[in-house]
Image: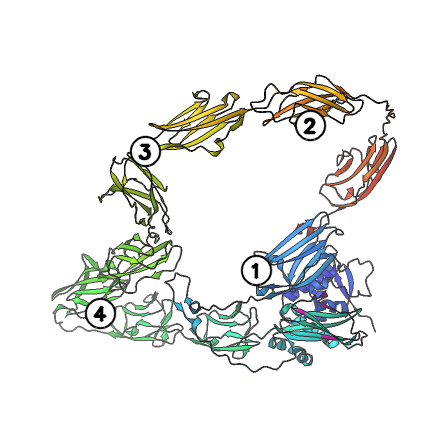
Amino acid sequence: MDSPRPLKVSCDLNPIERLWDVLDRQVRSTTGPPCNLQDLKDLLDMAYPAEQRISTLNVPEKELEAHHLRTPHQAKGYTDKPAEETVPGDDSQVPELTGLFVERPQSVTVTKGKDVTFVAKVDSSNLIRKPNMKWLKGKWLDLGSKAGKHLQFKETYDRNTKVYTYEMSIKKVVDGDAGGYRCEVTSKDKCDSCTFEVTVEAVQEEQPANILEAFKRSGDAGEDAGDLDFSGLLKKREVKKEEPKEEVDVWEILKNAKPCDYEKIAFEYGITDLRGMLKRLKKMKKVEPKKSDAFLRKLEPAYSVEKGKRIQLSVELTDPNAQVKWLKNGQEIKPSAKYVFESIGGIRKLTINKCNLSDDAAYECVVGEEKSFTEVFVQEPPVTITKLLDDVHVVVGERVEFEVEVSEEGANVKWMKDGVELSRDGKYRFKKDGKKHWLIINEATKEDIGMYQVFTNGGESKAELEVEDKELEVLQSIADLTVKAAEQAVFKCEVSDDKVTGKWFKNGVEVVASNRIKMTHVGRIHKLTIDDVKPEDAGDYTFVPDGYALSLSAKLNFLEIKIDYVPRQDPPKIHLDTTGSMVNKNTIIVVAGNKLRLDVEITGEPAPTVLWKKGDTEITNSEGRVRVELRKTLCSFVIEGAERSDEGLYNITVTNPAGEDKAEIMVKIVDVPDPPENVKCTGVGEDTATITWDPPKFDGGAPVKGYLMERKKKGSSRWTKLNFDIFESTTYEAKKMIEGVLYEMRVFAVNGIGISQPSVSSKPFMPIAPTSEPTRLTVEDVTDSTCALKWRPPERIGAGGIDGYIIEYCLEGGNEWVQANQEPIENNSYRVRGLPVGEKMVFRVTAVNIAGRSPPAVLQQAVTIREIMERPKIRLPRQLRTKFIKMVGEKVNLVIPFQGKPRPVVNWYKDDKPLDPGLVNIRTSEVDTILFIRQAERQHSGHYTLIVQIENMEDKATIEIQIVEKPGPPVNVLVTDVWGFNAALEWKPPKDNGNTEISGYTIQKADLKTKEWFTVYEHNRRPSCTVSDLVMGNEYTFRVFSENICGLSDEAGLSKNTAVIDKTGLKYDPKPFKEKDMCHSPKFTTPLVDRCVIAGYPAAISCSVRGYPKPKIIWMKNKMIIGEDPKFLMQNNQGVLTLNIRKPSLFDGGKYTCKAINELGEDEVECKLEVRVLTDKEEVKK
């Protein structure tokens, strides 16, 4: 068979890498089917023009096809058989997969809502630079850009093992996290990757048994706002059971189909990975059954299973006892609840439960050296439409949105109009968000009318779009005119849209503007003005709005008058119509904002002159908001958009040569009232609040009928109505509020015209109830003029807390309570002062907060204000009932409480004598006395007596204080006897025992040769002892320390004589001392190591040496002594040698040698230093 024909590809650096970068961008930019081999060749011609070609690389077509069938990332790691023909001298190689991973992440099954962590470890001991790790989901999605609260990444490095540890944590796993993942590690020319899967299991949730939980209020306002949503209580319709559909083998359909129909079949059966489908289909067509020694029946070429279903892979072996391995994408599968292995005789089965998209992979069954391959394709369930399209009815120019909701997120849908598929262009726009899809038409036209359809692979929906022309409303049409020569003719009309333009026609011919003919457009009013009317101006005039099938017509009549008689003269007369909006004879009421048009009929010959006045101001305008329009026998007074300033008395005067007539008209403007003022909260309760406000300053010309109130929580934008019927008073009690929540109120005023604007919101207030009464009110103490009370806080405090307490008192039987404290107190006790002696008083305590005072807590019985006699009593602390011992120099502070009323007299005595104030400090209060000694001395020891006396009653307590210190040394220490290896010692107790008894003695011995002391006995109770185990031939001296509770004495008593242990004829002959020779030749304990450094960055090489005498160190580069070159700094720190190179360049690379020399010899070590220049790509990465 002929070898594959090589395809010559021109490139500059790493051609395979650049080729697949181009292919990667091309694949990402298109959604169509994958390109074929010819397309790859075209891409190569585009990516590498002739002028950029430096070298050539022969890539066989077989290798291109293999790369074509893989993703660009897989193409980089392609390790099939290399091409047979290569160009000599071309060193570019494709990175090969190597075993960089020490630990790979494993596939897991995790419950929805839980956390999961994946760990990968990489050995960098053989790597020149730090490896680069990427976490990917699926084929293309780089998870590094998704880092956040949901996805977290961590990297650590162990310097001892040179292992990098990479961790990826997924917090609170959701359904979308399920699928296949891949981690890739690269380092220069080495790379490695591994795959793993995440399976997400749903959490079983129980349905609530309470029917009240089935409905709720809409919105997020309070409990009394929003509408009730009873959709949860609706009966569920019986779902019609669809007849089971016959299972369809998609692969059989694809085998027999034409390539042009592949995309249509994939859309119909829910296949989203078109490239993977074509790859598998191509393999299925090429696979030919081969005989196998290990397998009687191999796996099928491909399996298809629906998402969520179970699939079983089965093979039959020739040897029933043979062991098999199941692999998924090259990774061995471990038995679990998802993957179940079965062995029945020679049949081996792999069952995959609850298949999901992560199970869509290549599977292998391995027996010894033989393998059986298959592909499992997971078919997603058909995408159904859960929310159908609605018909849309719009007018020309409006925005159109068709919305549909499908059963799966990210599903593809197809939009069609009248059976023609719609494409994404300037007119149609498609939008997708989760399960919702929209078709948007920004400006609808008549051409968009039709039937619109949306298709998924599991359903369709239709909706009709109707587009109508805009309707234009004529507010005032043009009227026929009859004018005389040289007069002015004005045609005027008013339409509803102020943006509409139009044209004027005379007898069907468009009117052209000139100095005499003018056309104006102001707002909604269009005018045609003809000055100095002539006979030829007579005719039919028409106004046609642009874009509307509408026309307004009127006729201009030219009147030619010949005066050949004496006119008749009639005095002018004003004829007022008092019907309609007139409340009395000459008063007109107009609602603010409305239009007033008063037509006044005027008669008289000749035609009278009309004059309108408001007060002393004449109204002469024929245009504008307030104007006067004159006709032959009719005068119209017009006010456009009436305002309050238009209210007043208007006069009309008509005159002609025959006389004059006048009339007065009162115009009254009514409006909605002004907003109420000064809205405030005057009182609050537990869930209520009292609101007051002032009536509006202006009632709008009509009496205010009542008010409407609204409230909202502070910080919210949603207002809740409190009343739907008009509330007439200006004080309102709002109820059903939440205690402790800040609210705001606003009020609307209502009159016969309408509702006013809302008032300014009140200051925030909080519904708070007063606390309950304080508890456990008791009397703590009573004197001749005071009474001390104490109590506990209220049982119910509420959200308002407690600001303090008020204490009041009154005489028994009276009702005039006197407040004892001006300001509330925070403590739970208080002494009321200034009370009358001997009177019976009643006390009560009230808690106060922002809501007011609580109910009072009252004493059950009256209290007589008189001090009670109480016997004196000393309460001596437990530690003072025995001897109190302190060391010299320590501080003594004794607090002794006592009781008694009235205040007792306190006296101190020492050893039955009055206590000297200069010796001891005494401080006494009403309830205790304190004895204080700053620095204790031995003279402070003794018996202290405390006497507490009230009149002829007293109590007494005695305290024994002992001040101690270390004892003195023993005296008269003598060696009384020596025998064998023993010596007997005796001594007398010390003269000063430190004011306490001696607890023992410590005896030490010392050889007169070494004079080092060693302890022989501790805590020896007797003033004598026998010292044994003494060394023959030595002479010993002894010393003794005395000991009490403070410790050993500072000085010891030395023995006056010594103990000599005689020899028994033995003689010691020591060998002469020989000093060790420490000299030796130099030897390197740590050699130099080859290094690669970056140019421009400081570098250092180091080693260590030992030798005596201290060797001389010589550094050499390429066998040349470096000497005193300032670029090199040589250091020697206790045998550690370091050569520092300042900013090395390419010329500093080479072989470096370190030589150590002394009298006994020499030694040397060497290393190779490589200096590398940092490339632009590496600088960008840094």
What residue type is disc 2 on?
Answer: Tyr
Task: Rate crowding at label 2 as few (under 14), some (14 to 19) or many (20 or more) other CA atoms within 10 Å.
Answer: some
- Whichever of callouts 2 and 4 sits on the residue coming sooner in the sequence is 4
Relative to 422, residue 53 above or below: above
Q: CA distance from mark 4 to mark 1?
A: 83 Å
Q: CA distance from mark 3 to mark 4?
A: 114 Å
Q: Secondary structure at mark 3?
A: loop
In-image side of 190 versus 1050 (left or right): right
Residue stretch in magenta = 314-339
Percent position of residue 238, x then y: 48, 79
Q: CA distance from mark 1 to mark 2?
A: 71 Å
Q: CA distance from mark 2 to mark 3?
A: 64 Å
Task: Rate crowding at label 1 as few (under 14), some (14 to 19) or many (20 or more) other CA atoms within 10 Å.
Answer: some
What residue type is disc 3 on?
Answer: Met
Task: Rate crowding at label 3 as few (under 14), some (14 to 19) or many (20 or more) other CA atoms within 10 Å.
Answer: few
Residue 671, visible in the rendered structure: no
Q: Secondary structure at mark 1?
A: loop
Q: Which residue is mark 1?
A: 172
- Whichever of callouts 3 and 4 sits on the residue coming sooner in the sequence is 4
Relative to 796, residue 64 above or below: below
Callouts 2 and 3 close, C-beta under 8 Å = no
Q: Which residue is mark 4?
A: 631
In-image side of 995 versus 750 (left or right): right
Q: CA distance from mark 3 to mark 1?
A: 73 Å
Q: Which residue is mark 2?
A: 1017
- Whichever of callouts 4 and 1 sits on the residue coming sooner in the sequence is 1
What residue type is disc 1 on?
Answer: Lys
